Image: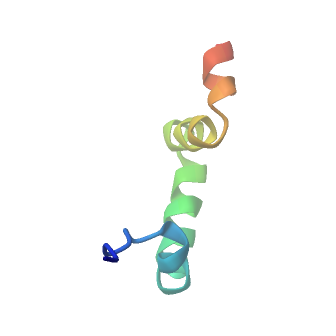
Amino acid sequence: MERPTPVEPADLLPELSPEVNLLLARMREVPLGETAVAMSFDPSRGAER
């Protein structure tokens, strides 16, 4: 019995890359978005502060 596999982010990247790039660009412009992204990729950074 194979269960339906959850959608992986990698599966969406090809279709969403333009939108994702726009979102990332906007987040880089906003300090709050930038810190949120940095913490999501590097939790240790948030723990240090």
Question: Relative to 40, does residue 2 appear above or below in the rendering?
Answer: below
Residue 28 in the image, given as x and y percentages of width and height: 60, 51
In the picture as drawn, the residue positioned furthest to the front comes out as: 1
Q: Which quadrant would residue 3 be assigned to in this image?
A: bottom left
6 or 25: nearer the viewer = 6
Question: Relative to 40, does residue 49 appear above or below in the rendering?
Answer: above
Q: Which quadrant would residue 47 be assigned to in this image?
A: top right
34 or 46: nearer the viewer = 46
In the picture as drawn, the residue positioned furthest to the bottom comes out as: 15
In the picture as drawn, the residue positioned furthest to the top comes out as: 49
- Residue 29 as seen in the image, left or right of residue 7: right
Question: Relative to 30, does residue 1 appear above or below in the rendering?
Answer: below
At 53% from the left edge and 52% from the top edge, which residue is drawn? Answer: 27
At 31% from the left edge and 75% from the top edge, which residue is drawn? Answer: 4
At 31% from the left edge and 76% from the top edge, which residue is drawn? Answer: 1
- Residue 49 as seen in the image, left or right of residue 9: right
Residue 29 in the image, given as x and y percentages of width and height: 58, 51
Q: In the picture, which quadrant includes the C terminus?
A: top right
At 62% from the left edge and 30% from the top edge, which residue is drawn? Answer: 43
- Residue 44 as seen in the image, left or right of residue 24: right
Numbered label tally: 0
8 or 26: nearer the viewer = 8
Residue 24 in the image, given as x and y percentages of width and height: 56, 60
Colour treatment of the image: rainbow
Residue 9 in the image, given as x and y percentages of width and height: 49, 68
